[in-house]
Image (tube, grey):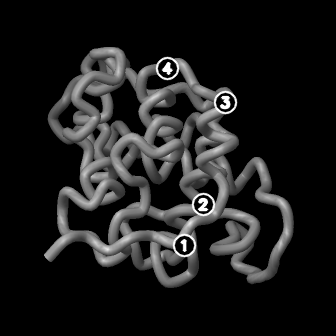
């Protein structure tokens, strides 16, 4: 059912695009996304950042926004990983397609990468500094070759740094 809702959402985003155009969009794999989701949750998913329904890019997880709407702590569920994955791939699907199609080249085309690195104004400061383990994890996912070690190390909570004035 989740795949059908993702397809219908992509179809509605496509507007005038034909079925073949939408079918050709390449996205990062959902398989193995849990380790990437943990990085995003720990760096971006607090309740005052992307762990809120008022953000265009939403991150769900055990210590933040829950898909069932009931706050509390606990393990992130498959439904929460699915919801975070969908939020990311639907945020800028055409740009994401280009990054994935190029094997992860020029990931800074994505707003998520720009803001995470602090290149673009971001209320949360630098959440995933260029060259950090968290950054390497996300980039490996975009290149369709998840670096589990970088993701494990990058999932450790660290306070975000503020961008230079």
Q: Where is residue 58 in the image (x, y as percent from the top left)?
A: 48, 64
Q: Do the residues labelled 3 and 4 touch (CB within 8 Å)?
A: no
The residue pinned by badge 4 equals: 144
Q: How far is disc 2 from disc 1 in space, using C-alphas? A: 8 Å
**Quadrant of residue 15 within the rendered picture:** top left
Query: How many badges with numbers are in the image?
Result: 4
Q: How far is disc 3 from disc 4 in space, using C-alphas? A: 12 Å
Instruction: From this view, report whether residue 44 is shown above or below residue 140.
Output: below
Instruction: From this view, report whether residue 135 is shown above or below residue 123.
Output: above
The residue pinned by badge 1 equals: 51
Instruction: Label 2, secondary structure: give it.
Output: helix
Nearer to us in this view, 102 or 19? 102
Q: How far is disc 3 from disc 2 in space, using C-alphas? A: 16 Å
Instruction: Label 4, secondary structure: give it.
Output: loop
Question: What's the mark number on residue 41?
Answer: 2
Q: Are marks 2 and 1 in contact (CB under 8 Å)?
A: yes
Q: Which of marks 2 and 1 is in front?
A: 2
Q: How far is disc 1 from disc 3 in space, using C-alphas? A: 23 Å
Q: How far is disc 4 from disc 2 in space, using C-alphas? A: 20 Å
Q: Residues within 10 Å of mark 4 (few under 14, many from 20)?
A: some
Which mark sits nearer the N-terminus, 3 or 2? 2
Which mark sits nearer the N-terminus, 1 or 3? 1
Q: Where is residue 77 in the image (x, y as percent from the top left)?
A: 79, 55
Q: How crowded is mark 1: few (under 14 residues within 10 Å), some or many (20 or more)?
A: many
């Amino acid at each position: 059912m989740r795949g059908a809702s993702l397809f219908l959402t992509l179809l509605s985003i496509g507007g005038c695009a034909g079925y073949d155009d939408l079918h050709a969009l390449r996205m990062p794999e959902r398989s193995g996304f849990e380790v990437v989701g943990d990085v995003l949750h720990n760096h971006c998913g607090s309740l005052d950042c992307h762990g809120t329904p008022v953000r265009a890019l939403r991150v769900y997880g055990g210590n933040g926004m829950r898909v069932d709407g009931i706050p509390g702590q606990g393990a992130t569920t498959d439904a929460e990983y699915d919801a975070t994955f969908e939020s990311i791939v639907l945020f800028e699907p055409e740009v994401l397609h280009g990054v994935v199609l190029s094997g992860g080249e020029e990931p800074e085309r994505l707003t998520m990468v720009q803001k995470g690195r602090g290149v673009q104004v971001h209320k949360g400061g630098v959440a995933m500094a260029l060259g950090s383990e968290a950054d390497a994890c996300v980039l490996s996912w975009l290149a369709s070759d998840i670096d589990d070690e970088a993701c494990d190390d990058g999932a450790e909570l660290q306070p975000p740094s503020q961008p230079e004035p």
